Amino acid sequence: MRDVVVVGGGIVGLATAHEVLRRRPGADVLVVEKEAAVAQHQTGHNSGVIHAGVYYAPGSLKARFCREGAEATREYCRDKRIPFSDTGKLVVATDAVEVERLEQLTTRARANGLAVTPLTGGELREREPHVSGEAALHVHATGITDYAAVCRALASDVAAAGGEVRTSTAVTGIAERSASVDLTLDRDGWESVEATRLVILCGGLQADRLAAMSGLNSGEDAFSIVPFRGEYFRLPESRDDLVDALIYPVPDPDLPFLGVHLTRMIDGGITVGPNAVLGLSREGYRKGSVDVRDVASWAGFPGMWRVARTHWRTGLAEQRDSWRRSGYLRLVQRYCPELTVEDLLPEPAGIRAQAVLRDGTLVHDFLVRRTERTVHVCNAPSPAATSAFPIARHVVDLATAAA
């Protein structure tokens, strides 16, 4: 028997367990993670960016939590002596359409309370000599860190506060009763754990399946996690001084992706990416990975076909550029024309867990649902790593109300 069980050893799950123990010292908290270590999926396969919250609709959870979370992340990194750097970010417009979108983005950023500075093409070139564009937006409060290191520190904090982080443990069943929740676990054999207060599920790429186990994912409110593979390259060490800030294109406002960007990593190198290719495996990071069950999951979901009808041209373009480095390169050359195909070196891919509703809506905001004794984080892609601490506070507030 446990007071609280948190499912998922990514940054959101660990921050949530940390928050439970902060509020209830001495509580019996168990974190279960099906992989052999924490931070093995979205948390450990991203650009490491501490986002400022430029892109998100004012008043949305993403807008609120990203700004709060950026400062909380920096504070935690200072406390734990985890390296971070405030690099700033430049969003670069390369044609008239993007200039107009950039103006709208500037308005949104200011509505979100962010300090941003518009730049002309000439001012951009002075600031970043290797980058060109018609205009740019300097976002001051953007940085980088190592989120896997943050997760390891959180896991240590949970253990130090009396909790337990149990890896190589998968949840295979959820039975909610009037006064408790029974979880069936697979860890070298079957076992059962009873949570006497509540269960909080931060399952990322498996969020829809965990919600279905709780009876939360059926009918018109159903959602499916659709994996979008984000492929990266790394520039050679000779290019480590190419840019000082993070360099982003102007994103398509109809899609929840930010485009292929140049990111200075905390180790000093520079990565290029990610794109957004429909994934054939939720957890297959090698190119060409296929999981029949995962493909059947989104292929049999009506909402995915509605998405496909709306965005099929974009999807085909992403797939084409995935297989041709020259096509991928052209996306970057729009704002950094001197890069060549030889500059694109292999780098591990990531996979974004994107929730899609039955009506074909790509869920842009964080999505949390609950039953009487369970709370499910159903959609928490980027900027969830930046926003993990306020997401945790929000989730624990909901969990307390549910229990």
Image (cartoon, rainbow, N blue to C red):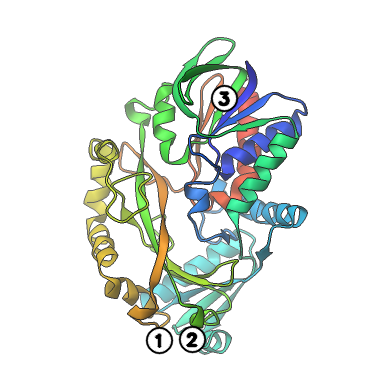
The disc label shown at residue 130, or none: 2
Q: Mark 1 points at which residue?
A: 338
Q: Earlier in the sequence, mark 1 or mark 3?
A: 3
Locate residue 52: give its quadrant: bottom right
Q: Earlier in the sequence, mark 3 or mark 2?
A: 2
The disc label shown at residue 199, or none: 3
Whole-angstrom CA distance, mark 1 to mark 2, is 7 Å
Say few, some or many: other residues with alpha carbon within 10 Å of mark 3 (under 14 / 14 to 19 / 20 or more): many
- Seen in the picture, residue 1 relative to 107 is either above or below; the reply is above
Q: Residue placed at 42% from the left, 81% from the top?
A: 336
- Residue placed most toward the observer, 250 or 180: 180
Marks 1 and 2 in Cβ contact (< 8 Å): yes
Q: Position of residue 161 (x, y in %)?
A: 75, 33
Quarter of the figure that contains the C terminus: top right
Q: What residue type is labelled 1?
A: Glu
- Seen in the picture, residue 79 relative to 321 is either above or below; the reply is above
Locate residue 9: give its quadrant: top right
- Residue placed most toward the observer, 94 or 246: 246
- Seen in the picture, residue 270 relative to 77 is either above or below; the reply is below
Along the horizontal axis of the image, is 287 left or right of 12? left
Q: Say what secondary structure mark 1 lies in.
A: loop
Q: Where is residue 172 in the image (x, y as percent from the top left)?
A: 43, 24
Q: Say what secondary structure mark 3 lies in.
A: strand
Q: Residue placed at 46% from the left, 25% from the top?
A: 188
Quarter of the figure that contains the N terminus: top right
Q: Residue placed at 28% from the left, 75% from the top?
A: 326
